[in-house]
Image: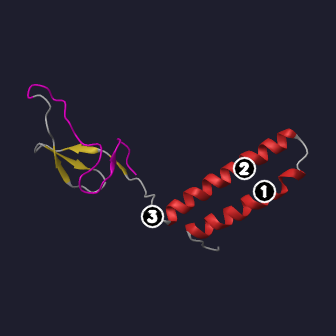
Amino acid sequence: MNEMTPQECAEVLKEIDIYFKQTSHIVVSDFAKSLAQKKIMAINQSAAVMRKLAEGELVEVVHARWIFDSDGYVRCSACNQKAPVFLQYQDEPETNMSRYCPSCGALMDGKDD
């Protein structure tokens, strides 16, 4: 299988986009023309994502959850590092925990990767 960089993928998608635009006048029905326009938009959006990926603007999101320890800390399910639990009110068990792990940056949305 031919492996391509994200930048090379973006360039190929741009070439496909140009081809679609050059040949879209050949399409006869309005439905087919509408479908071709949607494909062109999808290709442009895909190329934009690939360019951002190549430039390092996009990073993989790691999903995790907080695991409560008996010692008053929570532990990240992704990196296993401890973080303190800050109580909002002394009498209430509600906590004010970060949505992101301070150690690895995992998104604390309750899902594990």
Q: Secondary structure at mark 3?
A: loop
Stretch in magenta: 90-113
80 left or right of 56 in image: left
First in sequence, mark 3 or 2: give its number: 2
Q: Is residue 53 magenta?
A: no
Q: Which label sits on residue 39?
A: 2
Residue designated by label 1: 20
Can you say which quadrant of the picture contains the N terminus? bottom right
x and y percentages locating residue 46 in the rendered image: 61, 55
Q: What residue sits 55% from the left and 56% below the top?
A: 49
How many numbered circles are shown? 3
First in sequence, mark 2 or 1: give its number: 1
Q: Report if the CB atoms under discs 2 and 1 are less than 8 Å apart.
A: yes
Q: Amino acid at mark 3?
A: Gly
Q: Amino acid at mark 2?
A: Lys
Q: Secondary structure at mark 2?
A: helix
x and y percentages locating residue 112 in the rendered image: 37, 48
Residue designated by label 3: 56
